[in-house]
């Protein structure tokens, strides 16, 4: 492909919009237009946090029942199942701490999803 002499003197690279930051791309829009562009992300993030919490509970339940991950791999459900044998022998902490960790982790993920719903819902603002 031959270049003409006039095109070689003004060979400035063309700006690419893909390399710009998202804030730069939304800079020319007013707040309503920017909210309309970013609005579909909110429900997806909220649903993702709910699904992550459900997946953690499901994995722990299956591991507790013995049909989840292999016993050689660490899992909160496996720890709770193993600790269940020692529950009434005075070593209650073997069950309580993994159970509390599971509850706190799922609660934190659900609270994150609730906060994202409140923060990203334009109707609540």
Image (tube, rainbow, N blue to C red):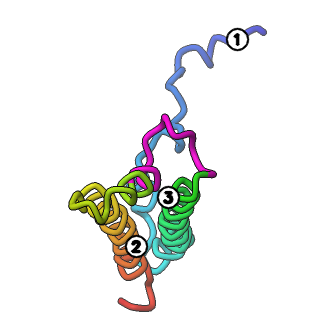
Q: Residue at x 58, y 14 (%)?
A: 8
| Magenta-drawn segment | 67-79
Task: Name the secondary structure under disc 2.
Answer: helix
Q: Nearer the viewer, residue 102 or 30?
A: 102
Q: Position of residue 97 (x, y in %)?
A: 26, 59
Image quarter in which the C terminus is found:
bottom left
Query: Residue 27, how many percent across, how many down?
Result: 39, 61
Q: Vertical placement of 73 versus 96: above or below? A: above
Q: In the rendering, which numbered label is found on residue 60? A: 3
Foreground: disc 1 or disc 3: 3
Res 3 label: 1
Residue 74 as seen in the image, left or right of residue 104: right
Q: Nearer the viewer, residue 70 or 28?
A: 70
Crowding at dot 3, Cα within 10 Å, few <14 / some 14-19 / many 20+, comes out as many
Cβ–Cβ below 8 Å for labels 1 and 2? no
Q: Examine the image and state in which quarter residue 98 appears.
A: bottom left
Nearer to me, 122 or 68: 68
The residue shown at (39%, 67%) is 106
């Amino acid at each position: 492909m031959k270049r003409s002499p006039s095109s070689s003197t003004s060979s400035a690279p063309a700006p690419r919009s893909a390399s710009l930051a998202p804030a730069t791309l939304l800079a020319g829009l007013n707040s309503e237009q920017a909210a309309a562009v970013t609005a579909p992300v909110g429900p997806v993030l909220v649903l993702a946090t709910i699904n992550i919490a459900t997946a953690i509970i499901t994995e722990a339940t299956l591991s507790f029942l013995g049909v989840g991950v292999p016993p050689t791999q660490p899992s909160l459900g496996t720890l709770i199942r193993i600790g269940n044998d020692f529950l009434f022998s005075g070593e209650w902490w073997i069950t309580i701490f993994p159970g509390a960790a599971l509850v706190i982790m799922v609660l934190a993920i659900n609270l994150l999803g609730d906060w994202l719903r409140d923060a990203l819902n334009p109707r609540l603002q």
